Image (cartoon, rainbow, N blue to C red):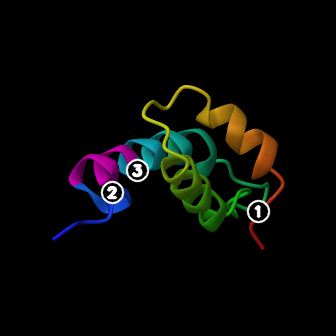
Amino acid sequence: MESDWLYSEDRLAFREKCLNLLLNRFGSKLSETGVPIYSTESIYNCAHDWVSQGHKITNGIIKYYETYYHGVKSL
């Protein structure tokens, strides 16, 4: 039985690493009212896309988020 490479243990661990990196960088940024500036959804989507594209290292993911997801603000 063939399994989906995207959800292999290695890819899930890598996705977790990507999420931690992005959440640490963008997830803790709050507005003056204490509301998160960047949506958790945009952070998760970025990590998923990064892994889905076959990346094997996190180098470049911050720039990728800033380029394609940075404008997605929390409500």
Query: Where residue 55 sits: x, y (%)?
Result: 49, 38
User: CA–CA distance between discs 3 and 2?
Assistant: 12 Å
Query: Where residue 48 sits: x, y (%)?
Result: 52, 57
Q: Residue at x 79, y 62 (%)?
A: 73
What kind of secondary structure does the magenta stretch mostly adopt?
helix
The amino acid marked with disc number 1 is: Thr
The amino acid marked with disc number 2 is: Trp
Q: Which residue is mark 1?
A: 33
Query: Where are the magenta residues, as a range?
Result: 9-14
Q: Residue furthest top?
A: 59
| Front of the two marks 1 and 3 | 3
Disc 1 + disc 3, Cβ < 8 Å? no
Tell me if residue 44 is in the magenta stretch. no
| Residue at disc 2, secondary structure | helix
Q: Residue at x 32, y 54 (%)?
A: 12
Query: Where residue 60 sits: x, y (%)?
Result: 62, 29
Which quadrant is the C terminus positioned in?
A: bottom right
Which quadrant is the N terminus positioned in?
A: bottom left
Q: Residue at x 67, y 48 (%)?
A: 29
Disc 1 + disc 2, Cβ < 8 Å? no
Residue 44 tag number? none
Q: Which residue is mark 3?
A: 15
User: CA–CA distance between discs 1 and 3?
Assistant: 30 Å
User: CA–CA distance between discs 1 and 2?
Assistant: 42 Å
Residue 5 tag number? 2
Q: Residue furthest right?
A: 71
| Residue at disc 1, secondary structure | loop
Q: Quadrant of residue 26?
A: top right
Q: Is residue 22 above or below residue 49?
A: above
The amino acid marked with disc number 3 is: Arg
Front residue of 38 and 1: 1
Q: Residue furthest left?
A: 1
